[in-house]
Image: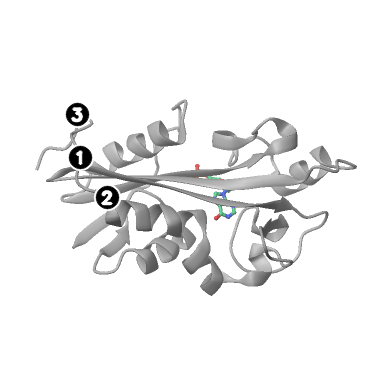
Amino acid sequence: MKAVLASGNEHKLRELLHALPGWELELLDADAFPPEDGATYYENALGKARFGRTLAEGWVLGEDSGIEVAALGGRPGIESARWADDPVAALLAALDGVEDRRARYVCELVALGPEGERRGTGVLEGTVATAPRGDEGFGYDPIFVPLGETRTVAELGNAWKREHSHRARAARALYASPTGGSSGDSRP
Ligand code: IMP
């Protein structure tokens, strides 16, 4: 099945491709994306998918994700991409001296297409390291240590991430989900 991912992020594309066998997924050809102004990951993912449907035929996948830190009351959450100029340094500073390092990655996926809407949610639990380690992945990966691991996601690497990330989990949930009702934009 051909589908378009309403994102400019190659890392996200690679993680999703692995978890969606049979999907020929490619990035949306767009110069700019509308601002993320939803109140939830789902609203933002839906907004991206709806935007994609104005530019592309067939199935369009919208994705929104973030990191939720327990000691910060779940922040930065949906603000993860834009709450600081240097989000990794800002998170390390916010947790300086803090013992509770629990955090989780969350990903919400929404597919809009000829047969309606499909969605999937994925979560990866872990902790925030005290200093960056590793070179792979993107965003908070150098300081995120998944539960049961001692290495950061950036050290575990892209192959690990394709199997275990919040995004891979959301994609598998979406893949297994039935096609649901419309979100007002599921015309063929
Ligand atoms: P989005 O592009 O609005 O979904 O932004 C999500 C932000 O959350 C990214 O810019 C990263 O800062 C963070 N994030 C989401 N998923 C990941 C991940 O897999 N690794 C590292 N950071 C992530």
Q: Position of residue 90 (x, y in %)?
A: 76, 41
Going 16% across and 37% down the picture, which residue do you hit?
186
Residue 29 can be seen in this image = no
Residue that mark 3 sits on: 184
Question: Which percent across, then down, holds residue 127?
Answer: 72, 51
Question: Which of the two residues, 43 or 168, is positioned nearer the viewer here?
Answer: 168
Q: Are marks 2 and 1 in contact (CB under 8 Å)?
A: yes
The secondary element bearing badge 1 is classed as loop
Point out the tag, 2 or 3, that comes first from the N-terminus: 2
Please report the residue visible at 26 percent of the width from the left and 48 percent of the height from the top.
Answer: 60
* Quadrant holding the C terminus: top left
- Asked where in the image residue 27 lies, by quadrant, the reply is bottom left
Instruction: Kindly tell me whether mark 1's CB lies below 8 Å from ligand 1.
Output: no
Mark 2: which amino acid? Ser
From the viewer's perspective, is residue 73 above or below residue 171?
Answer: above
Which residue is labeled 2 in the image?
Answer: 177
8 displayed left or right of 71: left
User: Is 98 drawn above or below residue 136 in the view shown?
Assistant: above
Q: How many marks?
A: 3
Task: Identify the disc placed on residue 63.
Answer: none
Provide residue 98's location: percent of width, then percent of height: 86, 40
Secondary structure at badge 2 equals loop
Q: Return the mark for residue 180.
A: 1
Q: In the picture provided, is 177 more to the left or to the right than 172?
A: left
Circle 3 SS class: loop
Q: Three-letter amino acid code at disc 1?
A: Gly
Judge depth for marks 2 and 3 and give the one in front: 2
Give, as a three-letter code, the residue at label 3.
Gly
Within 10 Å of the Cα at label 3, are there few (<14), some (14-19), or many (20+) other Cα atoms? few
